[in-house]
Amino acid sequence: MTTTPEQSPDTSGQCPDTRGGTVRTPFAVGESADCGPLPTRADAVRTRPDTPRPDTPDGVRIEYRATVPRSLVAAAFLEGLAEISRATTDQTPRTTAVLKIPTLFVRDLDARPAHVLPQVTPGCEWVVEGEGVPTRKWDGVCFMLDDNGGWWARREVKPGKTPPENFIQVAYDETTKKAYGWEPAGQTGWRDIHTEAVANSYSPNRPGTYELVGPLVNGNPEEYEGHLLLAHGWAPFAARVDLLHAPRDYVGLHQWLHARRYEGIVWHHPDGRMAKIKANDFPRP
């Protein structure tokens, strides 16, 4: 496992090592001239073992590589251990997703806009109790890659509306009467942009969910120069370190989120439960 402190500023016009998790973007698309928020996520790489062993003919060596500022070397080392653990134990692709993640705090549906109240949504108490891992919520369009290599776009069907052809319903909200599910990506208005994003992103071939971001997506609040698919749960390394220190109370989150450019936070519990909160769930301070 190797963690390399960031060296002197790069004057060649190229970014430092930006290999990063599921999504690895080329300089011209995913990074600004100053490399943006450094560093991006390090990688757990499977390679052939140095010396074949008869008792483990299919064995692999797990390498962890990261280029980080000196102040984050310790954090990178700890993350390396976690990455290696996930790489060696989590071999089951996740193609099912909770399409309607509960909001951490109860929403005031009688107000306009319907901001949240300082009351925890029943079932989300585990977040304020300090459980679960926080991840960055990206502002884009949700897509899913299934186990057969097929791409699907998240679709919300409002009450009284006819679902699109080949729609697969996954969830239904009794309060809003909305249905949530997936429709084939190729039949949506995002088809061409999604195809471009697949080409731009580094091997988005692991089944799971992704966020489509870029110039023609939601006004491009993430400020990417090209269209990309970001794996859910991924964020630049520095952002993930920042998220680990995010507060979990109403007042603290209100102030913390509005002081950053994140759309929001999604917490993941080890048992599969999730909860979310967005900056615009709170009134502007």
Image (spheres, rainbow, N blue to C red):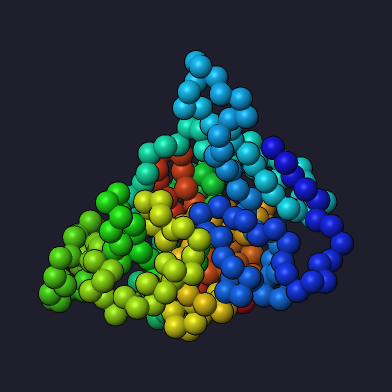
Q: Quick one: 94 or 55, which is closer to the camera? A: 55
Q: Is residue 11 left or right of residue 51?
A: right
Q: Is residue 171 above or below residue 285?
A: above
- Quick one: quadrant of the C terminus? bottom right
Q: Residue at x 74, y 44 (%)?
A: 3
Q: Which x, y percent locates residue 262?
A: 57, 68
Q: Is residue 242 visible?
A: no
Q: Which x, y percent locates residue 180?
A: 25, 63
Q: Which x, y percent locates residue 214?
A: 49, 77
Among the 4 quarters of the image, the one containing residue 151: bottom left
Q: Quick one: 217 or 13, which is closer to the camera? A: 13
Among the 4 quarters of the image, the one containing residue 246: bottom right
Q: Quick one: 153 or 108, which is closer to the camera? A: 153
- Quick one: quadrant of the N terminus? top right
Q: Is residue 92 left or right of residue 255?
A: left
In the displayed orientation, state which residue is furthest to the right. Answer: 8
Q: Which x, y percent locates residue 89?
A: 48, 32
The total of numbered circles placed on residues is 0
Q: Residue at x 34, y 59 (%)?
A: 144
In the displayed orientation, state which residue is furthest to the top. Answer: 55
Q: Residue at x 26, y 71 (%)?
A: 186
Q: Quick one: 247 or 62, which is closer to the camera? A: 62
